[in-house]
């Protein structure tokens, strides 16, 4: 059986503390997912490296972690069979972190600082998601997942070729989120005013047609003189009028039985009351009975008098029933046209009157809106220019930091520049300047010269796969992510590099792991040698099925794995010696650990 429970290595030499100030992945369990039947892995602080043969399933673990933090799932990911795929992750998350506050606001409690995420994906593609044993939606998991892990694959490197991502890196470096949010709100306000202007400045013929339609509807509703409770009152009156003879007969009979008829209830009750009065004269114990009956007499008299007055007050005016039915029919017709009730119909009339007022005085209204738009444009322009000035200052600092970072990654001759594109001239088709966006007035592009003497060019034109990997790593290290303190996951960041460059990348990953937990998939021994926890991913056969397993490597096993990565299938004492020296070199305290 290939199921394993794996404990991570102890913290590396020089490791400060047992946990990070941010989130950290402590444990992951995967069942019935792709090539994995049942797999459990415990992770530690520092640099966690996954190595193995091509096709062994290293990226499957990264995909599983992606699902745990909110990526979309499909039934193709579920291992063949009837059982659902189950993916579980335990993260440490400090109580003061944004993610912990989000959980508290949702009423999801946890034990200590731990967050347990469990996700089930059925063969039919159905999902069930739990956070700390509370059922949640995928959107909620994605929101929480943004505070747990940041996963980077080759698609992130391709994202560098998208100019929109460049501004995001710059703003994260400059910590410009508050200013960007304010500009985004201003931009939304501008668009709202523009839409109102567009709807107000309609074709004159269409405006007049709309005015006539609104006036007709308002007049029809106002003439009806609606009252909120009128229908209920009319329906009650209709019932009375439709049964007036029977009601009159019942009221008359009731009055006779209680008061006027021979042997009426009241006359009999009064006789009983006199008898009780006599009994009270002999024994005071009858007082309570007499007083109780006396109170009942008053109530019976009230009912009798009400019956008398009711039958005498019934208005059997000819034609009243017909009037009530006509009014109800009118109310029903208006309700079908304008609302389900009188209240809704009246609200509709108010809305029509407001629109009618805008249309009748549309020129004044249009002038007011255009003036308001001008004011908003000035305010946006002012905010945008202030943010743009700060971005220019941030860009110069970012250039210096990235150059240092690239030098550490064996790109000593590389030059890096943040280019601000000028605004395109307006074509006059819109009132809002075209360079106004929800992120400001700037368009930036990262320019790179990889070799000495070459001119700066866009990333897409000069960067090889290996150079792009190092530039992406530099940006992640310097600019960070949307939130620091998360587990950083790198899937094949070593694409297109090797040798001395790979060693530089490994050293940088190790440096980053002193402040953030790092999980990395690599094919290069020069990177794997820097691991504080090294895992080997293998693929084997169990019965008739292919399964992926993961094994934590001790020191001797690490030497064997590094030798395999150095020498291929044939491992010699020479490759073992080389692997041993590489491991000793990378983990030497003199090197920072």
Image: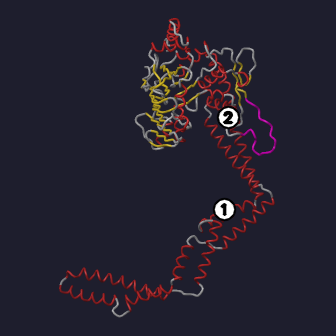
Q: Is residue 425 part of the magenta span, yes or no?
A: yes
Answer left or right for 569 relative to 268: right
Q: Residues within 10 Å of mark 1 (few under 14, many from 20)?
A: some
Q: What is the residue that sits farthest to the left in this orientation?
A: 282
Which residue occupies 43% across, 84% down? 306
Q: Position of residue 155 (x, y in %)?
A: 63, 29
Q: Residue extending furthest bottom? A: 262
Between discs 2 and 1, the one toward the N terminus: 1
User: Which mark is on residue 488?
Assistant: none
* Residue, disc 1: 351
Marks counted in the figure total 2
Write the start and end of the magenta stretch as one range. Answer: 420-436
Closer to the camera in the image, 575 or 421? 575
- Residue 591 visible: no
Q: Secondary structure under badge 2?
A: helix
Q: Is label 1 in a helix, a strand or a loop? A: helix
**Which residue is depicted at the point 55% across and 13% down?**
568
Res 453 quadrant in image: top right
Where is residue 454 drawn, in percent x and y? 75, 17
Side of 526 relative to 204 (left or right): left
Residue carrying label 2? 387
Q: 357 left or right of 234?
A: right
Does the magenta portion include 224? no
User: Where residue 71 appears, x then y in whole percent?
Assistant: 56, 36
Left or right of 461 in this view: 487: left
Q: Is residue 438 above or below residue 195?
A: above
Is the residue 473 above or below the residue 88 in the image? above
């Amino acid at each position: 059986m290939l199921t394993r429970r794996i404990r991570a290595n102890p913290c590396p030499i020089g490791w400060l503390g047992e946990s990070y100030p941010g989130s950290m992945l402590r444990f992951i369990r995967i069942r019935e997912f792709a090539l994995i039947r049942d797999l459990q892995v415990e992770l530690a602080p520092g640099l966690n490296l996954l190595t193995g043969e091509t096709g062994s399933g290293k990226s499957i673990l990264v995909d599983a972690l992606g699902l745990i933090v909110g990526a979309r799932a499909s039934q193709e990911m579920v291992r063949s069979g009837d059982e659902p795929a189950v993916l579980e992750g335990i993260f440490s998350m400090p109580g003061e972190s944004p993610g912990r506050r989000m959980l508290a606001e949702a009423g999801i409690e946890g034990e200590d600082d731990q967050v347990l995420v469990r996700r089930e994906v059925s063969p039919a593609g159905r999902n069930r998601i739990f956070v700390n044993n509370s059922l949640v939606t995928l959107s909620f998991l994605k929101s929480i997942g943004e505070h747990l892990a940041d996963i980077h694959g080759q698609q992130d490197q391709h994202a560098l070729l998208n100019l929109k991502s460049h501004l995001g890196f710059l703003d994260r470096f400059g910590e410009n989120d508050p200013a960007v949010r304010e500009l985004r709100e201003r931009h939304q306000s501008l668009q709202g005013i523009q839409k109102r202007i567009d709807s107000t400045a309609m074709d004159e013929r269409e405006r007049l047609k709309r005015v006539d339609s609104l006036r007709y509807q308002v007049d029809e509703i106002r003439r009806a003189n609606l009252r909120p409770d009128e229908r209920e009152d009319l329906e009650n009156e209709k019932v009375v009028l439709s049964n007036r003879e029977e009601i009159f007969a019942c009221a008359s009979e009731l009055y006779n039985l209680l008061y006027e008829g021979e042997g009426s209830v009241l006359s009999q009750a009064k006789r009983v009351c006199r008898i009780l009065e006599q009994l009270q004269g002999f024994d005071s114990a009858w007082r309570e009975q007499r007083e109780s009956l006396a109170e009942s007499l008053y109530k019976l008299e009230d009912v009798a008098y009400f019956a008398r007055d009711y039958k005498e007050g019934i208005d059997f005016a000819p034609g009243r029933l017909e009037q009530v039915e006509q009014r109800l029919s009118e109310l029903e017709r208006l309700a079908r046209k304008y609302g389900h009730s009188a209240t809704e119909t009246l609200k509709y009339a108010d809305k029509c009157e407001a629109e009618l007022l805008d249309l009748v005085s549309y020129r004044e209204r249009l002038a007011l809106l255009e003036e308001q738009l001008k004011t908003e444009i000035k305010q946006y322009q002012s905010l945008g220019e202030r943010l743009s000035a700060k971005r220019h200052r941030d860009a110069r600092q970012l250039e210096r930091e990235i150059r240092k970072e690239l030098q550490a990654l064996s790109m000593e001759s590389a030059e890096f520049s943040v280019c601000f594109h000028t605004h395109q001239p307006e074509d006059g088709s819109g009132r809002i300047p075209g360079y106004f966006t929800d992120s400001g007035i700037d368009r930036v592009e990262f320019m790179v010269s990889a070799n000495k003497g070459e001119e700066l060019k866009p990333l897409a034109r000069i960067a090889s796969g290996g150079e792009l990997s190092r530039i992406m790593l530099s940006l992640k290290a310097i600019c960070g992510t949307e939130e620091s303190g998360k587990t950083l996951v790198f899937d094949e960041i070593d694409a297109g590099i090797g040798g001395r460059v790979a060693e530089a990348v490994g050293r940088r990953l190790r440096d980053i792991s002193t402040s953030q937990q790092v999980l990395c998939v690599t094919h290069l021994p020069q990177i794997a040698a820097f691991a504080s926890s090294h895992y080997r991913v293998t693929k084997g056969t169990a019965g008739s099925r292919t399964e992926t397993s993961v094994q934590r490597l001790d020191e001797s096993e690490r030497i064997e794995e590094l030798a395999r990565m150095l020498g291929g299938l044939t491992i010699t004492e020479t490759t073992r010696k080389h692997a041993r020296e590489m491991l000793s070199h990378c983990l030497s305290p003199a090197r920072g650990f």
